Image (tube, grey):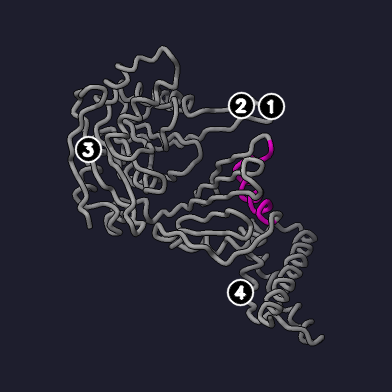
Amino acid sequence: MLGVSLAIASDTATAAVVERVRERLRADESDPTRDPGYAERVIRSEVRRHNDFALARGFAPLDDEGACVREVLAQLTGYGPLQAYLDDPTVEEVWLNAPDRVFVARGGVAERVPVCLTDGAVRDLVERMLHSSGRRVDLSQPFVDASLPDGSRLHVVIPDITRQHWAVNIRKFLPAFRDVGRLVETGSLAPEAADLLVDAMRQGRSILVSGPTHAGKTTLLAALVAASARSQRIVTVEETFELAIDAPDLVALQGRQPSLEGGGEVTLRRLVKEALRMRPDRVVVGEVRDAEALDLLLALNTGVPGAATIHANSAAEALAKLAALPLLAGRNIDAQFVLSAVARSVHLVAHCGRDARGRRRVLEIVTPTGRLVGDAAEVRSLYRAGRS
């Protein structure tokens, strides 16, 4: 009980320091996100002031001044108790099912962490995260996807779509893994598979990356695009910026949600069409999930190389899904034309998956032969991972 009481007292003292620091920064008209160095000096001053007062009055001081300074700074300039996990390079994803049910994933394995927030604190964190994106979440728009300043992806769902609490997912941007060499080092990609995919990218082949959720599709796609010839002009199309590719000649396009009045929406279909007017050597679609598959196929069919990810359980199923999605664009779409276009325009499919230990791996690479077998594109296997 004594330990619990001390922890509560420490939290109360930290909250008091946060409020005093906020008051000083407001009085000085200082933005802690723009000048964190000054904010840190003010925090350190207030922590020492608190401890001097506590010792004079016989109260318990804040024992670890450095930890308190970091915690207060995270609340003012970062994302509070979540900041430590966002800074941790071993953490791949952070999610909240409720204010007191917070989880992280390391190496593909989920674990619950000792973080306890309030509903108000979760809302404040989300609003701070959305501030730089220009996106919103409210009763009229209960879902939101947005990019954080470091490139991580934020996804939020609020009641009454969720039962009671806000559901928050933060998929972190880990630049160290968006490199083909790094993927080979970690065992996610076999050297022979890496050579096959990189050669295809540099030769202007069209590649589809498939797999289930959290299989590493976006990471692989970003690494492959980064390995493209430096002379290529690349245009990327995403619902939310997530690829974060560094290339000398690149334009990144992002969709837009409708306004409060219902107008101003920019869809992936529109972005793919706009991308084709920008003299691309390659069009990259972050994820194909709807009728934009038709526009991508039309681009591939006219000789513009492409790359994209798609959710599927195998490479063959990925091709079948890519042939089915264009039918969502309207009733007048010729299914036979679409199927033929998939068989002839996609050159390689790299399928990703996770093993029992949560490791992400490229499991197989296939190439369509250009022929149809019934209602499916015939494929030839180029690579299959071992069972280890």
Label 1 near label 2: C-beta < 8 Å? yes
Element under disc 3: strand
Mark 2 vs mark 1: in front: 1
Q: Please state which amino acid type lies under the numbered disc 1.
A: Glu
In front: mark 1 or mark 4? Answer: 1
Residue kind at label 4, given as amino acid type = Ala
Compared to residue 178, the image places residue 230 above or below, namely above
Amino acid beneath label 3: Val
Q: Please state, as top left, top right, bottom left or bottom right, where the N terminus lies in the image.
A: bottom right
Query: Residue 3, image x and y in percent?
Result: 66, 81
User: Rounded to the nearest whole Å, what is the CA distance between mark 2 and mark 1?
Assistant: 9 Å
- Give the structural element (helix, strand or loop) at label 1: loop
Residue in front for this viewpoint, 142 or 50: 142
Q: Which residues are magenta?
A: 121-139
**Does 270 appear above or below 115?**
above
Q: Earlier in the sequence, mark 1 or mark 4?
A: 4
**Picture residue at 34% right of the left edge, 59% below the top:** 357
In this figure, which residue is indicated by the disc labeled 4? 67
The numbered mark at residue 261 is 1
Tell me the residue that label 2 is attached to.
264
Q: Tell me, yes or no, whether the highlighted magenta stretch contains residue 134.
A: yes
Crowding at mark 4 (Cα within 10 Å: few <14, some 14-19, many 20+): few
Mark 3 touching mark 2, by CB under 8 A? no
Q: Nearer the viewer, mark 1 or mark 3?
A: 3
- Residue placed most toward the observer, 235 or 354: 354
Task: Choose the circle earlier in sequence order: 1 or 3.
Answer: 1
Counting from the top left corner in percent of width and height, residue 37 is at 63, 65
Picture disc at residue 252: none
- On the image, which quarter does residue 265 sit in? top right
| Mark 4 vs mark 2, CA separation in Å | 45 Å
